[in-house]
Amino acid sequence: MTLPQASTPKARSTQWLAQKGLRPTRQRLALAELLVGDGKHRHVTAESLFEASQGCAETVSLATVYNTLRAFCEAGLMHEITVDGNKSYFDTNTSEHPHFFWEDSGELTDASTERMEITNLPSAPADAEIASVDVVIRLRRT
């Protein structure tokens, strides 16, 4: 999904929410502006988004950040990437693409799909279908 190319961060954030029919509450707009206001994609954790929101005029609790990220994911505005059992990142780029997880810094970045090929997936059980395949490549600096 491409991000709206509106002229201001507030207009871009409003359009981003509107394209999926989400009501633009003050808190959603504040968080959306942090996520897509500059027109660039982001990888955030709930904690990093909460920390970034502390400088905003709109007060947002950590619980609200979690609930809002879930709502954005359910609406298809973001994609959740789980790096280990208890750490999730949220990506505004919802296209199918792999990620690098930098173990030393805890940063998640996009990886190129240029040479990637996923083949020979196991068959899904009879009562299921494969919804998506997430690829997270863990990196350690040498």
Image (cartoon, grey):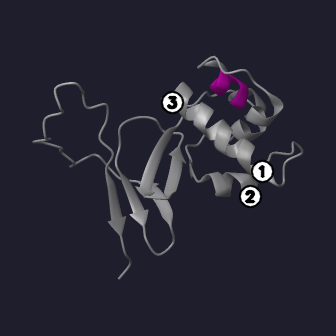
Using the numbered discs, state the Cα–Cα distance from disc 1 to disc 3 in whole angstroms.
23 Å
Asked if marks 1 and 2 touch (Cβ < 8 Å), the reply is yes
Q: Residue drawn 25% across and 32% down?
A: 130
Q: Earlier in the sequence, mark 2 or mark 3?
A: 3
Residue under circle 1? Answer: 53
Q: Residue drawn 52% across and 51% down?
A: 89
Q: Quadrant of residue 21?
A: top right
> Does the magenta stretch mainly form a helix, a strand or a loop?
helix
Q: Amino acid at mark 1?
A: Ser
Most extreme residue toward the left, as rendered? 120
Secondary structure under the numbered disc 2 in the rendered image: helix
Residue 66 appears anywhere in the view: yes
Residue under circle 2? Answer: 51
Secondary structure under the numbered disc 3 in the rendered image: loop
**Where's residue 39, x and y in %?**
62, 38
Residue under circle 3? Answer: 2
Q: Earlier in the sequence, mark 1 or mark 3?
A: 3
Q: Amino acid at mark 2?
A: Glu
